[in-house]
Structures are given as structure tokens and as C-alpha cells.
Amino acid sequence: MTKLWKRLDAWARWLLPPQCQLCGLPCPGPEDLCPACRLTLRPLPGGLEAPRGTARRPFAPFCYGSGAQVLAQQMKFHRRPEAARLMATLMAEALPRPFLGNAVVLIPLALHWRRRLQRGFDQAQLLSLWLHRLTGLPLTAVLRRHRATAPQSRLPREARSGNLAGAFYAASPPQPGLTPVLVDDVATTGATLSAGRDALLAAGWAPPLHWVFAWTLPPSPP
Ligand SMILES: [Zn+2]
């Protein structure tokens, strides 16, 4: 964030103190989240360890099913795109420092254009944009959807991976020397991340890392 942006942001907060994005109470701190609501975000057990080559284990600061779930649902289902900034801030804060020095490029797990039109925004794209802004990591939106798929949240777990098979394609060739990082708001079964990963691998990209705000699964043993 530039100095000018930070100063403007501080002035805006002074003139109009923000409200907590979860409970609506005035929130004086730098985050749009009051201390009580901050405690409802349950960190993922095991913390944030670097994936060990499998890329099936995402970086995720929080467990889904806590305040993190409420925040993610508010953004998506109650159409509050402003929650993306807070979610990205929390994700960036939790990221291990060495990650920022790595040669990586952020890639949002894009929605189909029809879904984006219905919702008015694409949550993965918004999160990626904020992460790019906050961390300076490069961003490229190469993943596209061939077709609109049924919302994963309405399907039983066993049907989720079939629903997404072949749903994505990579619109650009790999960027040499850069490890792709797939970004999404939540991961439940990991089916969307796997479908995005398959599309990148098919286009010649390196195996991607995954970075989500909240994850339902406990970390697998090392
Ligand atoms: Zn609150």
C-alpha cells in the first residue's frame, strides 16, 4: 500500500469510524473487526505450514465453521464485497514471511461469467486483487471456466469433484520461473482447487500452491 493510500485511509477512518464487519459495532482499530469478533475466527489447527509438494494442503489461516464462515458467507451470499479487503488483510497477516520472497504469481479460481454477473462480483478475483495490493505479489487471471457448474455448497461432498471435472482451462501459457498460487475464499472438499490445478498442469504450468481464507478440513499428517 502506498503512503498516500495509507494516509487517505487513516483520514477516512477518522472522519467515519468503520463498523465491525461481523457485529456492526464501531471499530476503532486498523481492522474492520472488533476484538470480540476477532476471537471468533478459529485458527486452523497446525498453523500455516508450507505445502510439501502435494499442493493439496492449502495455506489457510482459519477453520471454516467459525466466525470465518460468517465473514465468507456475508461476502458471497449477502453480497458484501467489502469483506474481501478484511479477509485478504487477515490472510496476508498470517502468511509466513518467507513466502513473500518466493517467485509466485497469484491466480484467482474464477467464477463463470454468468455467476459473476448474477452476484455482481467474483469473490476469488476480489480476494486476489486485495492480496496483490497488500503483499505486492504479482497477479494474473489466467483461469477461466468452460461452463457454469452447480454451486458446490448445494451438492453432497461425493458429487463435488465430478461437478467440477474439466470445468476450468488456463487461457495463457505458464510464466517461466513462477510458481502459481491458486486463490479462493474457502475450501471444503478441495474439489475446486483440484480442478483449477488440473487445468494449470494441462497447460504446462508448475504444480500450484493453494491459498484460501478458510478450510473445512483438518491438516493432513505430514
Ligand atoms: Zn464485532
Image: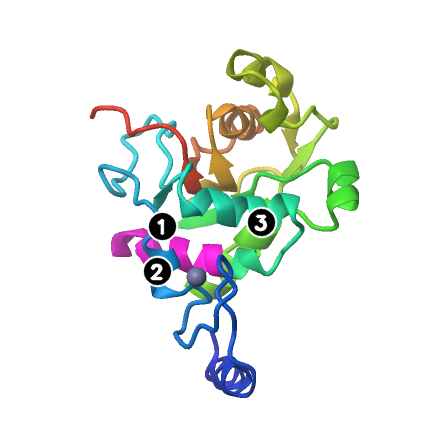
Q: Is residue 179 visible?
A: no
What is the secondary structure assignment of the residue under circle 2? helix
Which of the two marks, 3 or 2, is nearer to us in this view? 2
Q: Which mark is residue 36?
A: 2
Q: Residue 109 carries which label?
A: none
Upstream in sequence: badge 3 or badge 2: 2
Identify the amino acid type marked 2. Answer: Ala
Q: Which residue is drawn at 29% across and 29% down?
A: 219
Above or below 118: residue 96? below
The residues colored magenta run: 86-101
Residue for badge 1: 40
Mark found first going from the N terminus, 3 or 1: 1
Q: Do the residues labelled 1 and 2 touch (CB within 8 Å)?
A: yes
Residue occupying the point 34% across, 64% down = 35
Q: Number of marks in the image?
A: 3
Spot occupied by residue 154 in the image (x, y as percentages of width and height)? 62, 24
Residue identified by numbered label 3 = 74
Q: Please tell me in which quadrant of the rendered image residue 38 appears.
A: bottom left
